[in-house]
Amino acid sequence: MEQNQVTPSALERRIDISVSLADIEKEVDARLKRMARTVKMPGFRPGKVPMKIVAQTHGGQARGEAVGAAVEKAFGEKVRADNLRVAGYPSIEPKDGAAEGTLEFTAVFEVYPDVVLGEFAGRKIERPVLEVGDAEVDKTIEVLRKQRTSFKAVERAAVQGDRVVIDFTGRMGGEVFDGGQAQDFPFVVGAGSMLKDFEDAVVGLAAGEGKTFDMTFPEDYHAADLAGKQVQFEITVKAVEEPVLPEVDADFAKSLGVADGDVAKLREEVKGNLEREVKRRIQSRLKEQVMDALIEVAPIEVPKALVQAESNQLADNARRDLEMRGLKTKDIPVDPSWFKDQAERRVKLGLIMAELVKTSELHAKPEQIRALVEEMAQSYEDPSELVRWYYAQPERLAQAEAVVIEDNVVEWVCAKADTSDKDVAFDELMGNNAA
């Protein structure tokens, strides 16, 4: 057999493969003889079917398998001889005008790119720094209090932050529009669940009071038939309730899992959880900067086959996420092309990091994996249970191993780059709105 390699582009390769028909025929005969030992046919005992009949009934299958095996063997020999790292699967196409006594094919495929790392010196990376203290614990406990807000009825006009219960009727051109009417409808004024003009209209009204007002829906309103339209609302307030935050006491601590209600223990647990979350967010920000630096110092072209496979995987993940939210994905088309840019970035980083891990020996050590799993387990009531869960299956432990490898890469790059510490505000790091 004979192969001839052509290089049409940076990553695409074409190999012309020629296989001998005589060799194919020998392989077909060998396969038919093996089939004849077990083939079953009415009127014959197993293994006693005449070869002529076996060839008539199974000749096509045997020939197809023989040709496929020959082409696969020739392809494998060629890529190994040329030290080619094939990305994805080759496309095998028959060629016309083959020489007498041969079959000719063209294999089209992509190869992995060579990854050459540039210099990190001079590349600026800012490491966020935040120490968790009493102020951060207080803010977090305040958030926990607000999450457990209750409401009590008051005899006064509604203000921002109150929960109101109303009846309303909305009309456009004098006719009640679809979705424009409700009774005993509750909402918190200022929470953003209603349009601002609607919320503002309720402020100043007490239970038993009402008003009629005009309002214009935003141009980008989700209901197209109302977008940009002026309507008239008639509202009647049926109840005004003010928010009541729980006291930070034993009952509050128990509601958050502190069995004996010790508020000091609650603060310790909140601080420990905060420190882990702050560390995670700081590492995430640092990692993003490092990944950007990796792409900058090692510009590479990536195989389309790998990008397509990654796009398909991301699309599958999106479908599963939608299904977990109760949506039927057959009614929601999820096109892999939507994820092309994200997929290309992920493939690039995967190739670059694999090269860096290999050349700089940044593999995850068993003790690093164990430390990470135990750290993640600290936020659970029974940490040992989560540790056992991770170590019960190699696939789960591989997830922790991948995180450790990324952390090793981040640490290595930060040591090579111009890395400096930068204080970050608690609210900004945690994504809280200033309050």
Image (cartoon, rainbow, N blue to C red):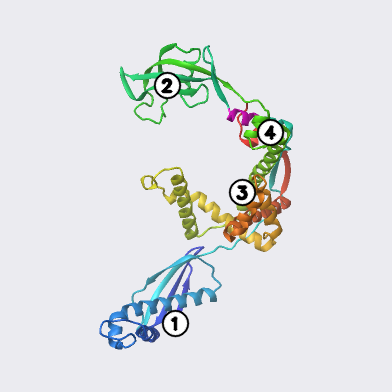
- Of labels 4 and 1, earlier in sequence is 1
The residue that label 3 is drawn on is 292
Q: Position of residue 29 (x, y in %)?
A: 36, 86
Label 1 – label 3 distance at C-alpha: 47 Å
The residue that label 1 is drawn on is 1
- Of labels 2 and 1, earlier in sequence is 1
Label 3 – label 4 distance at C-alpha: 46 Å
Q: Which residues are magenta?
A: 139-148
Residue 365 shows up from this direction: no
Judge left or right: residue 197 versus residue 141. Answer: left
Q: Nearer the viewer, mark 4 or mark 1?
A: 4
Q: Amino acid at mark 2?
A: Asp
Relative vertical location of residue 423 with respect to residue 110 in this rendering, above or below: above
Mark linked to residue 184: 2
Residue at x-position 68% and y-position 28%: 249
- Of labels 3 and 2, earlier in sequence is 2
Q: Residues within 10 Å of mark 4 (few under 14, many from 20)?
A: some
| Residue 357 lies in quadrant | bottom right
Circles 2, 1 touching at the beta carbon (< 8 Å): no
The residue that label 4 is drawn on is 261
Q: Position of residue 427 (x, y in %)?
A: 65, 32
Q: Amino acid at mark 1?
A: Met
